[in-house]
C-alpha cells in the first residue's frame, strides 16, 4: 500500500522553515514549541534541515549550515 503524504503536515514544516529564515536563521526553541508541534520540529531535525544549539542560557533552533 503506498504511503500517503499529509499535505498539511508538509505545509506546517515549510512554514516553520520560513519562520526561522525570517527571524534571521535562528530562534529560541521554546518559542517554536508553542507555535509548532514537536513532530514538525523533529521531522526537520531528522531531515537535517535545522539543528539545535545549546547556548548555555537556552536552546536555539537554527537553519543547518549545509542547507
Image (spheres, rainbow, N blue to C red):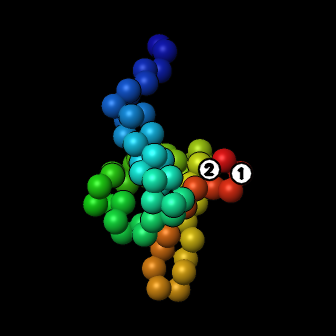
Q: Is residue 13 above or below residue 10?
A: below
Query: SS at mark 1?
Result: loop
Q: Is residue 41 above or below residue 12?
A: below
The residue pinned by badge 1 equals: 66
- Give the residue at x 34% y 61%: 33
Q: Kindly give the residue lying farthest to the top in the view shown.
A: 1
Residue 45, position in %: x, y? Answer: 55, 52
Point out the tag, 2 or 1, that comes first from the N-terminus. Answer: 2
- Give the residue at x 36% y 69%: 30
Q: In the drawing, does residue 1 fall left or right of residue 8? A: right
Residue 25, position in %: x, y? Answer: 54, 59
Q: Kindly give the residue lying farthest to the left in the view shown.
A: 34
- Give the residue at x 49% y 69%: 60
Label 2: few (<14), some (14–19) or many (≥20) C-alpha neighbours in 10 Å: some
**Badge 2 vs badge 1, beta-carbon distance below 8 Å:** yes
The residue pinned by badge 2 equals: 48
Q: Nearer the viewer, mark 2 or mark 1?
A: 1
Residue toward you, 46 or 12: 12
Q: Is residue 10 above or below residue 54?
A: above
Amino acid at each position: 500500500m503506498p504511503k500517503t503524504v499529509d499535505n498539511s503536515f508538509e505545509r506546517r514544516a515549510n512554514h516553520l522553515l520560513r519562520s526561522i529564515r525570517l527571524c534571521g536563521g535562528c530562534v529560541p526553541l521554546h518559542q517554536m514549541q508553542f507555535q509548532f508541534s514537536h513532530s514538525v520540529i523533529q521531522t526537520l531535525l531528522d531531515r537535517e534541515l535545522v539543528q539545535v544549539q545549546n547556548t548555555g542560557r537556552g536552546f536555539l533552533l537554527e537553519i543547518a549550515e549545509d542547507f
